[in-house]
Every structure is written in structure tokens, then in C-alpha cells.
Image: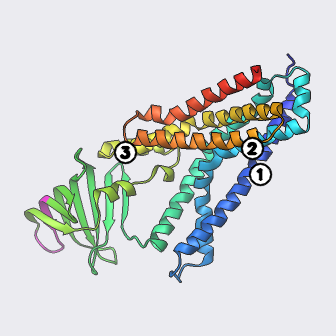
Amino acid sequence: MSRVSPLLSRYLAKQFLVGFVACMAVLAGIIILFETVELLRRAEGHDDISILTLVEMAFLKTPETVQIIMPFGILFSALYTLWRLSRSQELIVARAVGVSVWQYLLPLLLVGFALGVTRVAVINPIGAAMITRYEQLDSRLLRGKSGTINISKGGLWLRQSGDADASIVIHAEGIEPSGDVFRMVTVFFVKPDGSFTSRYDAKTAKLHGGNWRLDDVWINRPNLPTSHVDQISLQTDLTIGQIEESLAAPETLSFWSLPQFIRTLQLTGFSARRHQLYFQSLLATPFLFSAMVLFAAAFSIRSTRRGGNFVLIAGGVATGLGIYVLNDVIGAMGTSEILPVFVSAWFPSVIALIAATIILLHVEDG
């Protein structure tokens, strides 16, 4: 068995990398175009929103979508690279001098794994920052939401619209396991100029039926003595579901900041399952990308031996759809607590890697 020369390895890696960059560039352009059209549709009736703002929003959302389709970009780029090298007889010559499929696949596998690491360590943080900005613009310009929800080590901060004279800012140190009772709650009534009209300090607050029910409340107003009431109610348009959904989505958080945010959620009593699942899925990404390269090799070898491109195309499409469905189903099972987080996050990548290796071994030996 011949040893693959460094020159051939660099050549194969370059061909794959160039094909991947070209594929993703085309897909990114298509994504921006369709996203802009969708935003134009949503912006009908909003005459104050310029076309440049909508294009900016489409651009800001693109990295998130690109990350989702990157496994398919890896798969089809590897398929195209191996198909083109086979058509030009380059791989056939390499095989004739004793280079095995595993030897000429090694550069592609290394590039695929490196792209997975790049997606996690570099593209994900950039995409998280951009999608956060997109969500802010979308919420303010298209959805008209005025309330904001933030969580930190100090607890949960909520902002909701009040009356014409003041808005309401609510701080809670944490939430009870029941999910609808907040601990050590402070309510600030804030004027448009930023000054306070009053402050409520409550031991607990329960959100139910469009109202905050504050218990054991101390009321502070400027130039007035502090007073105490056992219970007081405040109207709100917030629900527990909205609060949980409005907490920073996993996609808006950088890979590097996810562990700290998960710890913060756990400290305040909120479920961190979605974020844990997303974090573990990111860790599994390089292995999924490697599996895509192995699938591409298996189908390219089979199509070359059978003399047709149908196997190549059909195999690639079927694999892409199969991985997507498997990842979606297993992810849903993890979110709904049917499967443990670790199993749900790593199962698609591990199964894809094992299946691709078995298929390639069978095809190569056959």
C-alpha cells in the first residue's frame, strides 16, 4: 500500500475546501434573496422601514441559516469533489498505484472536522451576535413588542408597558419549581424621563390570569412613608410561556457563553434543557461533518462502479434528508425529556458516523 504524498493530500484538501466555500457562498446568496423577499412581505404597511434595513436584517439572519445547512454543504461538496476527481481519472490513477480509499479520504476528513470546529468556535459566536441584533430589529420594527426579558446572575429582569405615565420594570431573584411563583420580587414604576414614581418589594409574586399577584408587599413612594399590604395585583400581558420563550434562545448565545448561561438558568430555577441540548449538539458537530464526508465517499464509489450518477444524487439527497429528520426527531425527544440530553445531542452524529463507516467498508470490500 502506497503512502499518500503531502502534495496529493494538500491537493485533495484544497479541492474539497474550495468546493465547500463555493457551495456555501451560493447557498448564502439564495438565503439572503429569499429572506429579503419574506421580510418585504412582512413589512407591508410599515412605510417607515427602508429597504436597506430589510436587507440588513436578511444579512443578519443568514449566518444562523447557514449553520443549519452546513452539514448538507459538507455532504454535497464532498460528493461533487469526489465525483469530479473520479471523472478526471485522478482518483482512479491514485487507486491504481495502491492508494486506498481511507488514505485519500483522510485529507477530506480532516478538513471536514476542522470546518466543524470552525463552525462551533468561530461562526457560531458571530452568528449568535448577528441573530441577536436581528431579533431586536424584528421585535421593534415588525412585531412591535415593547416588553423585554433578561436573565443574569442577579436574577430575572422583566419590562412591560404600564400606563401613559410610567412603564413597569420587574426584578425577581428566582422562580419556584412550580414555575409560576417568583421569589423576592421588586417592581419599579418608571417615568419616561427615567425617574421612579413608586417601588413595590414583595416576598413572592404569582403570574396568573393576566395579573401579577404580589404577596407581603412593602410600598415605597417619594416623599411618603413606607406602607405595607398583604396582597396587591398588577395587570400584565405576560404569561409564563412567553417568559420562558423570551429567555435568550440557545441560537442567540455564543458557544463560549452557553455554559455560564446554563448555570445562571439553573440558579434562578428555569429549565436549562434546551440550552444544554444545543451546547452538546455543537460539541458533536465536527463528528457529524466527518460522517458526511464518509457518506459522500460511499456513494461516489458506488456510483463510479455502477457507471451512473443517479446513485450519487439519490444517495446524497436521501442521506441529507435522513440525517435532518433523525436530528429533528431525536432533538424533540431530548427537549421533551424522553431521552437524556447527552444521548439526544450525540446520537445522530454517532449513528451517522457508524453507519457511514459500515457502508463505506461494505462498498470498498465489495
Q: Amino acid at mark 2?
A: Ser
- 130 sits left or right of 195 in the view: right
Q: Residues within 10 Å of mark 1 (few under 14, many from 20)?
A: some
Secondary structure at badge 3 equals helix
Q: Position of residue 312 (x, y in %)?
A: 75, 39
Among the two numbered marks 2 and 3 on one chain, the one whose residue lies closer to the N terminus: 2
Q: Label 1 vs label 2: CA separation? A: 9 Å
Identify residue for label 2: 77
Which numbered marker is on residue 120?
none
Q: Earlier in the sequence, mark 1 or mark 2?
A: 1
Residue range corresponding to the magenta coloring: 215-225
**Magenta run includes residue 332:** no
Location of mark 3 (residue): 264
Question: Residue 229, position in %: x, y?
Answer: 8, 63
Residue for badge 1: 22
> Which quadrant of the structure image shows residue 357?
top right
Residue at (47, 38) in percent of width and height: 330
Q: Secondary structure at mark 1?
A: helix
Q: How is the image coloured?
A: rainbow
Closer to the camera, 186 or 182? 182
